Image (cartoon, rainbow, N blue to C red):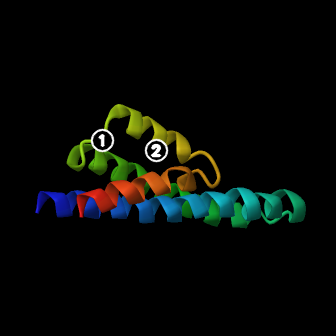
Amino acid sequence: MKQKMKQKMIRWFRYVGMIEGLSLIALVGIAMPLKYGAGMDEVVSVVGMIHGVLYVLYMGIVAMNTLYVRWSWKWVLVATALAFIPFGFMMIDRKLKQMEASLG
């Protein structure tokens, strides 16, 4: 049971990380150019709010993984830093897949 819970937490982290990462890409790659190129300020407000909520969810999942999976502080720092890099979630996804598979 404990291994299944750890596996589930890692899977949730991967999903939320991907969605949060895509929201960052949408914010930086779509909303910001529309704001400064086309004067559409409201796009940044909407996409920025969605990204902010997803970031808070992402950090909550990082905290839960720290507790349940017993991630080291190195993992916590890496996961937090990658949240600020577009496509950053892809940098550790392979390692997370391996970690998830080893628990199943």
- Tell whether label 1 touches label 2 (CB within 8 Å): yes
To which quarter of the image does residue 34 belong? bottom right
Q: Nearer the viewer, residue 39 or 47?
A: 47
Q: Residue furthest left?
A: 1
Residue under label 1: 71
Q: Residue furthest right?
A: 37
Specify whether residue 6 is in view: yes
Residue under label 2: 79
Specify whether residue 49 is in view: no
Q: Calculate the distance from the C-alpha at mark 2 to the C-alpha at mark 1.
A: 10 Å
Residue at image position (35%, 51%) is 60
Helix, strand or loop at disc 2?
A: helix
Q: Please state which amino acid type lies under the numbered disc 1.
A: Trp
To which quarter of the image does residue 103 belong? bottom left
Q: Residues within 10 Å of mark 2 (few under 14, many from 20)?
A: many
Query: Which part of the image, by quadrant, shows the N terminus?
Result: bottom left
Query: Which part of the image, by quadrant, shows the C terminus?
Result: bottom left
The percent coordinates of residue 99 (x first, y second) are: 34, 54
| Above or below: residue 81 compared with residue 52 | above
- Residue 104 lies left or right of residue 40; in this view the side is left
